[in-house]
Amino acid sequence: MRLSRLSGADLRESPHGGTGTTDLFNEKAAIERRILHGASSKVTILRPCAIHGPYSKHAREWWFVKRLLDGRRRIPLAYGGRSRFQTTSTQAIAEAVCFSLNSDQSQVLNVVDADAPTVAEIARAIMDSMDRHADLLGLPDVPYPPTRGVTPWSVEKPIVCASSVPSTATYAEGVGRAVRWLIAATQDRDWREVLPQLAAYPAHYFDYAVDDQALATAGVKHISI
């Protein structure tokens, strides 16, 4: 097992993302610096992570919600369900906007949930909010990189951010609003029309034949949460 690949979290604690290790983070930090240095008045830059909430066109939660609605009883997860991709609720973003009004200085604020759930924990929170449950099965770390059981949060190394503002709600406490909206918004509609940004992903997220092949793989392990 390649646990070492998941051993180092990417903590973006610097206001300008100085500890970011990817080109994407560094590019975003450079854009932030240009905005701050060129501003003639107070500027607040909010830096959320994987956003969840009602009306999203890119609702990652649909990866689990659709499987549960379709009656899938066993769900395979790449990286053994251990991946962490920091989440941010739309409520946390709104609270950060209010928080920023208390300062007369320009600032860059990380905005995240009060926790950083694993993919397996995200699945459990969504299942609890729907009162529908399935068995979560962790796939072995070979072949690598994974091509099956890959969710929108599945990353090689954890991406965990320290919040710049008070974070009161955990992912599990906030995700229910997004789940309820998803179920209502996709009823009798093609989900691709509701979630065009998610539909644009190159991955075939809902090929259940691939799921079944993954579940038949040797070394699959039940995930207990």
Image (cartoon, rainbow, N blue to C red):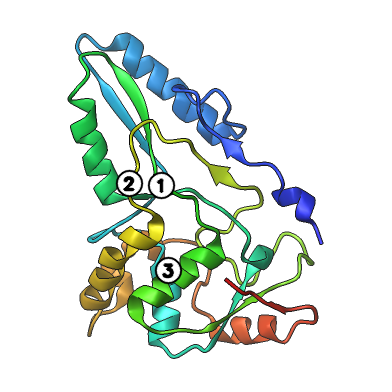
| Precedes in sequence: disc 3 or disc 2 | 3
Q: Are marks 2 and 1 in contact (CB under 8 Å)?
A: yes
Residue 154 in percent (x, y) is at: 58, 59
When asked about the image quadrant of residue 108, the answer is top left
Mark 1 is on which residue type?
A: Ala
* Residue at horizontal 42 percent and vertical 68 percent from the top: 125
Q: Quadrant of the C terminus?
A: bottom right
53 with respect to 140 (left or right): left
Q: Is 40 placed above or below 137 here?
A: above
Mark 3 is on which residue type?
A: Ala
Tag 1 residue: 114
Q: CA distance from mark 3 to mark 1?
A: 14 Å
| Precedes in sequence: disc 3 or disc 1 | 1
Mark 2 is on which residue type?
A: Thr
Residue 33 in percent (x, y) is at: 41, 17
* Residue at horizontal 49 percent and vertical 38 percent from the top: 161
Q: CA distance from mark 3 to mark 2?
A: 17 Å
Query: Does dot 3 land on a helix, a strand or a loop?
Result: helix
Tag 3 residue: 125
Q: Quadrant of the N terminus?
A: bottom right
Tag 2 residue: 168
